[in-house]
Amino acid sequence: MTAINPRFEAYYGNMSGSRWEGMRKSLLEKPEPVPFSEGLVRPYLLDYASITAARSLRLPEEGVILDACAAPGGKSLVLLSRLPPHLRLLANELSSERRRRLANVLADHLDAEKRGQVTVSGFDAAALGGRKSELCRFGGILLDVPCSSERHMLQKEKALSEWTAARPRFLARRQWTLLSAAFLLLAAGGSLVYATCALSIEENDGVASRLIEKYRNHAILDEPDFSEGEKTRFGRIILPDASGGVGPMYVARFRKII
């Protein structure tokens, strides 16, 4: 029997309305991953919505792309499959344990040529925005942030029992720190994709709106050009109850102008 947390149910029930019951059911079902194989020596299994999010980044004509929170590595593989030989990818992961997993995934799925296009790093992406030497360094940035991940939360009885509304608020603060830093790291004309696997509006449009508000003269919305999912105020969201179990995945895309 699935555990119930009244606080969790009230939060998402109020947010989703009559849709919540069906949403909850779809989140509890086991998702069917897609064997992504483009440009790889062997397929990598990941959610189709993750492929869509990674593909939504507009590639620059030159320079370096940053996958700021790259582990476990699926989205990095998707990015690399699209990279022409003259572009490079910096796949970054702060956690040393997750970074080892990221490095292993890249080594196991890429040929020698593609491995030569990617470097793995372990800096705090939120702190990097404070370094003048790093400002405007990257021609494109994929920022798939740590988030509530309600699908996983519902599978973990202890974590679900301890959930309060403070969790999405806390995560949204960290996400905003990462997003605002990423925008400082982005070169003029560059593309920035902000993605979560969360349902929480606080973590999705709530964070995206802050970028527009703070950098209103320099950050413009660049609506994702995939058709899956539903339009939100600042992006698109793919929800499992309406997408055959795919998702959740929220994507907001921005372009930097000077």
Image (tube, helix red, strand yellow):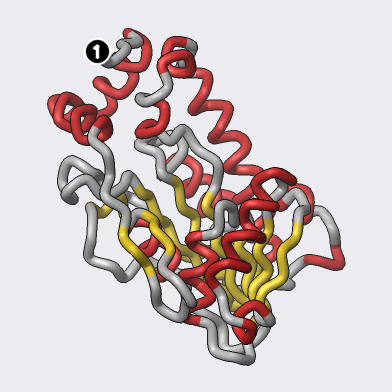
State whether residue 190 appears in this view: yes
Determine whether, in the image, residue 216 is placed left or right of residue 86: left
Determine whether, in the image, residue 84 is placed left or right of residue 88: left
Percent position of residue 60, x then y: 56, 82
Is 76 rendered above or below residue 12?
below
Is 75 rendered above or below residue 80?
above
Q: Which residue is mark 1?
A: 1
Label 1, secondary structure: give it.
Answer: loop
Residue at (31, 11) in percent of width and height = 4
Residue at (62, 86) in percent of width and height = 113
Q: As shown in the figure, which amino acid type bears the numbered disc 1?
A: Met
Residue at (51, 54) in percent of width and height = 212
Residue at (47, 76) in percent of width and height = 40
Q: Residues within 10 Å of mark 1 (few under 14, many from 20)?
A: few
Q: As rendered, which of 149 and 107 lies closer to the eye?
A: 107
Percent position of residue 217, x then y: 57, 63
Q: As rendered, which of 149 and 138 lies closer to the eye?
A: 149
